[in-house]
Image (tube, rainbow, N blue to C red):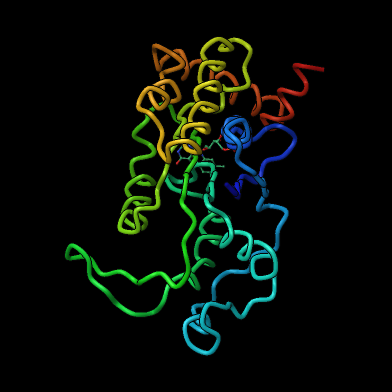
Amino acid sequence: MKVLALNSSPRTGGQSKTELMLNHLVKGMREAGAEVEVVNLRKKKINSCTGCFTCWTKTPGKCVHKDDMSNELYPKWLEADIAIYATPLYHYTMNAAMKTFIERTLPVVEPFFREHGGKTYHPLRHKHPKLCFLSVAGFPEPEVFDQLSAWVNFVYGQYGIVVGEIYRPLAEVLDLPFFKEKVNEIFKATEQAGKEIVQNSKISPEAIAKITQPIVQDKKQFYEMGNKMWEACIEKGVTPKELMAGLKG
Ligand SMILES: Cc1cc2nc3c(=O)[nH]c(=O)nc-3n(C[C@H](O)[C@H](O)[C@H](O)COP(=O)(O)O)c2cc1C
């Protein structure tokens, strides 16, 4: 089984919690025998879709752009059995880099209109990889992912290709030693989810419950901790990354 894992976080140097969660998901998938390639979209040149519809008319299935998407990523994506879309939650949805990638997958459908269950859709030109969405957020409530999940199921539900949705709120604390015990449980469950996707094409409710479990019992505890961190950043004139580096150094 071939898996293409796409990470759209712009953060580097171990700061990305999308990357942290993705590493564990990929570990589980590899342990279950999948061949996984991880691609950081921040390193790739992916132009925006221009809406010209050349990929539907003059060169069916082929985009006009000559960039990393056309030359490298789209062919790999078409070949993959599963694509993982790993994105930080920005403004309650995927970030722009991930959306840009997804918009460039338009050649996979044909222009024609069909109807299923009262809903209009475009038929597939090629086999679409199965999809697993992974996202992380700063806020503690699981509901912050409701819009993203609704979008995922509205867009891809009719094709029956969604094999997993992994959403981790309060993700910025995942690298704090203070929460080590719970975080380890979350990471283990994420590995388990990876195995289950490869073996069963779905994630068990038990794994999801462990991944999404609350890390702090009282949100006020988080507010206090978070607000102190931001106050310290503003006072010292440093970013969170610089503050943490200063504390460690
Ligand atoms: C532009 C921007 C928008 C964000 N919007 C949200 C949001 O709507 N809800 C939320 O809970 N967190 C939001 N966050 C916080 C990120 O989801 C959080 O920092 C996450 O860890 C980022 O993923 P990364 O560590 O992989 O880069 C936002 C962060 C940025 C920079």
* Residue 63 visible (yes or no): yes
Which residue is situated farthest in the left direction here?
118
In the displayed structure image, the side of residue 15 where residue 143 appears, left or right: left
77 vs 219, nearest the viewer: 77
Q: Residue at x 54, y 50 (%)?
A: 83
How far across and how far down the image is residue 191, in percent?
55, 27
How far across and how far down the image is residue 40, in percent?
67, 48
Q: Is residue 72 above or below residue 85?
A: below
In the displayed structure image, the side of residue 124 where residue 85 appears, left or right: right
How far across and how far down the image is residue 218, in percent?
39, 12
Quarter of the figure with the C terminus: top right
68 vs 115, nearest the viewer: 115
Q: Residue at x 64, y 44 (%)?
A: 36
Q: Is residue 159 above or below residue 209?
A: below
Quadrant in which residue 43 is drawn: bottom right
Which residue is situated farthest in the bottom direction here?
58
Quadrant in which residue 50 is drawn: bottom right
14 vs 155, nearest the viewer: 155
How far across and how far down the image is residue 185, in percent?
52, 16
